[in-house]
Image (spheres, rainbow, N blue to C red):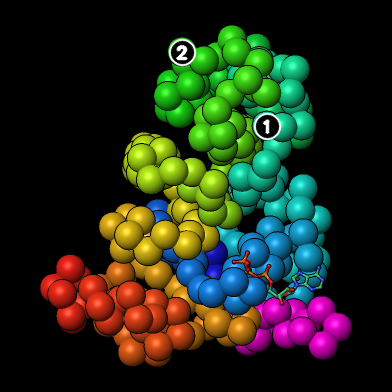
């Protein structure tokens, strides 16, 4: 579905992405982890067309998309949840989703005839249900909790009908309980929509519980990739990232050695 080959990007003297080659099979749920400044967000910027790589390929659905605009990449089916809900502070949740669904359908001219207004309404209601936002559909976006605003951001990305969904720290800024509720919803929609999903996450408990595959970046390069079980016992990852707390957890039997 998505594969990245030998991707490089420098900003001045900083090599933010170094020879990154990674694969994201159709229907997979992959976490990207790494210390601050490892190049995780830059990686998302490169694959979604927001920043152009210096070299390398981003093969999405069989075609190299390097050089295409971010809008064209969205149109081809790769969406990214941005903090966009805050752009529509006075719209209700339903109005914001309706605007996104309608905008997407207008862009997909060839599909327009297959999406009459009734279907676009049905699509909005389906998204409200999927995200658990139906009871809040008539609230203005700015009055939502932080977690619900993030869900609305995800909903606006889902309105693009993506095959691949990129989430940059979906649980950032949340307390422990809200974090787990959020990731459970994300996991539910991954299952329900059979998406290929990639998420950047700092909370290792969440990563190890939910991701099928984990790609670890350090100084812009791929340090390791594997299943959660492989990553948590990978010595390079432990040394570079998981650190002493992990050693302690292994020693006390909280996680397997
Ligand atoms: N537009 C830019 N101009 C200059 N330097 C940049 C730019 N974008 C990223 N960088 C640099 O590239 C490196 C990687 O940054 P990036 O934000 O991708 O890391 P990250 O892993 O997402 O970090 P964090 O976990 O803190 O969000 C950093 O040194 C950063 O300062």
Residue named by callout 2: 135
In contact (CB < 8 Å): disc 1 and disc 2: no
Please tell me whether residue 58 belongs to the stretch shown in magenta: no
Residue located farthest toward the left when viewing the structure as drawn: 253
Q: Residue at (77%, 59%) from the top-left corner?
A: 50
Q: CA distance from mark 1 to mark 2?
A: 17 Å
The range drawn in magenta is 8-21
Q: Residue at (60%, 76%) from the top-left corner?
A: 38
Q: Residue at (66%, 16%) from the top-left corner?
A: 140
* Numbered label attached to residue 13: none
**Res. 170 in view:** no
Please tell me whether residue 14 belongs to the stretch shown in magenta: yes
**Res. 146 in view:** yes
* Numbered label attached to residue 85: 1
User: Picture coordinates of residue 32 (x, y %)?
Assistant: 49, 67
State yes or no: Cβ of the residue under disc 1 lies below 8 Å from any atom of ligand 1: no
In the image, ligand 1 is in what quadrant? bottom right
User: Picture coordinates of residue 195 (x, y %)?
Assistant: 45, 47
Q: Secondary structure at mark 1?
A: helix
**Viewport quadrant of the C terminus:** bottom left
State yes or no: Cβ of the residue under disc 2 lies below 8 Å from any atom of ligand 1: no
Task: Give the crowd class for mark 2: few <14, some 14-19, many >=20 residues within 10 Å.
Answer: few
User: Picture coordinates of residue 47 (x, y %)?
Assistant: 66, 64
Q: Residue at (57%, 59%) from the top-left corner?
A: 61
Task: Give the crowd class for mark 1: few <14, some 14-19, many >=20 residues within 10 Å.
Answer: many
User: Picture coordinates of residue 83 (x, y %)?
Assistant: 67, 41
- Who is closer to the viewer here, 8 or 66? 8
Badge 1 or badge 2: first in the primary sequence: 1
Above-or-below relation of 187 to 54: above
Magenta stretch secondary structure, dominant = strand
Q: Secondary structure at mark 2?
A: helix
- Who is closer to the viewer here, 194 or 16? 16
């Amino acid at each position: 579905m998505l594969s990245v080959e030998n991707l490089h990007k420098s900003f001045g003297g900083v090599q933010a992405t170094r020879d990154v080659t990674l694969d994201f099979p159709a229907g997979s749920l992959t976490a990207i982890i790494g210390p601050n400044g490892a190049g995780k967000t830059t990686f998302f910027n490169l694959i979604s067309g927001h920043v152009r790589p210096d070299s390398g390929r981003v093969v999405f659905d069989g075609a190299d998309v390097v050089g295409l605009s971010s809008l064209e990449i969205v149109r081809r089916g790769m969406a990214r949840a941005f903090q966009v809900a805050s752009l529509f502070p006075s719209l209700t949740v339903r109005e914001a989703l309706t605007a996104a669904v309608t905008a997407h359908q207008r862009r997909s001219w060839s599909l327009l005839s297959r999406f009459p207004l009734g279907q676009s309404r049905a699509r909005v209601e389906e998204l409200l249900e999927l995200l658990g936002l139906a009871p809040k559909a008539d609230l203005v976006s700015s009055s939502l909790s932080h977690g619900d605003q993030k869900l609305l951001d995800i909903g606006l990305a889902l309105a693009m009908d993506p095959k691949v969904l990129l989430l940059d720290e979906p649980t950032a800024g949340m307390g422990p309980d809200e974090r787990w509720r959020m990731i459970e919803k994300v996991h539910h929609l991954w299952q329900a929509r059979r998406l290929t999903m990639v998420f950047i996450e700092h909370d290792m408990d969440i990563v190890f519980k939910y991701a099928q595959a984990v790609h670890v970046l350090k100084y812009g390069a791929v340090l390791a990739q594997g299943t959660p079980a492989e990553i948590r016992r990978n010595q390079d990852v432990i040394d570079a990232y998981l650190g002493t707390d992990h050693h302690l957890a292994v020693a006390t039997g909280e996680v397997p050695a």
